[in-house]
Image (cartoon, rainbow, N blue to C red):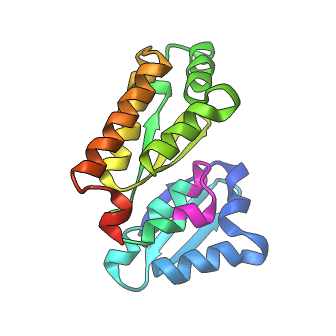
Amino acid sequence: MQHVTIPQDRIGALIGEGGATMREIESRAEVRLDIDSETGSVAVETVGDPLTGLKGPDIVRAIGRGFKPEEALSLLDDDLRMFELVDLDAATRNRNDLRRQKGRLIGENGRTRQLMEELTGASVVIYGSTLGIIGGPEQVESVRSATEMILDGAPHGAVYSYLERRRSELNEGGLNYHEFTG
């Protein structure tokens, strides 16, 4: 059994209307969820296939970090899909710096975050002091590198060029994630 703590304002998204989301997670990930809505603590117990059950805590974490339940459940679509969090607090000096860096990662009208998704094929969510990524290993690595570039102060244009170059490399190398998986 694993314990995951999620923000209280995300418990409703995890449970879903009438418990529908929770039941879908339990059914598809072959886990049982015990949610303490007072503390945000979620016990995740595998009740079926152990390999499938390993994805249960990441699905809960992903929903807790702002992903829609259907995006989080996409972790079950194949063995290569993964969830990763980048801690923005660790890369910032104070609250103002965190706010500025989040602004740079989101971009004007959400454009930077949107381009990260479009150019990598990954799902990207910025919530609180984290940036969450769901995708294949190459997609996650590309978004993580782009995030680090932005946090290190790289101009947006350089980051977009890097992402376009990575997309071309992955496509030419036969590593296009969507073709690779199916």
In the rendered image, residue 17, in percent from the top left (x then y), is placed at 78, 72
Does 167 sit left or right of 172 as displayed? right
The part of the image, by quadrant, that contains residue 49 is bottom left
Q: Quadrant of the C terminus?
A: bottom left
| Span shown in magenta | 63-72
Does 160 sit left or right of 162 as displayed? right
Question: Can the viewer see residue 143 in this picture?
Answer: yes
Question: Can the viewer see residue 79 in this picture?
Answer: no
In the rendered image, residue 16, in percent from the top left (x then y), is placed at 72, 69
Does 2 sit left or right of 126 as displayed? left
Above or below — where is 100 with respect to 166?
Answer: above
Above or below — where is 8 with respect to 16?
Answer: above
Closer to the camera, 59 or 1?
Answer: 59
Q: Residue at x 41, y 55 (%)?
A: 135
Q: Quadrant of the N terminus?
A: bottom left
Q: Residue at x 50, y 80 (%)?
A: 28
In the rendered image, residue 84, in percent from the top left (x then y), is placed at 41, 48
In the rendered image, residue 57, in percent from the top left (x then y), is placed at 46, 63
Residue 70 lies within the magenta run: yes
The part of the image, by quadrant, that contains residue 160 is top left
Closer to the camera, 83 or 5?
Answer: 83
Q: Main secondary structure of the magenta part?
A: helix
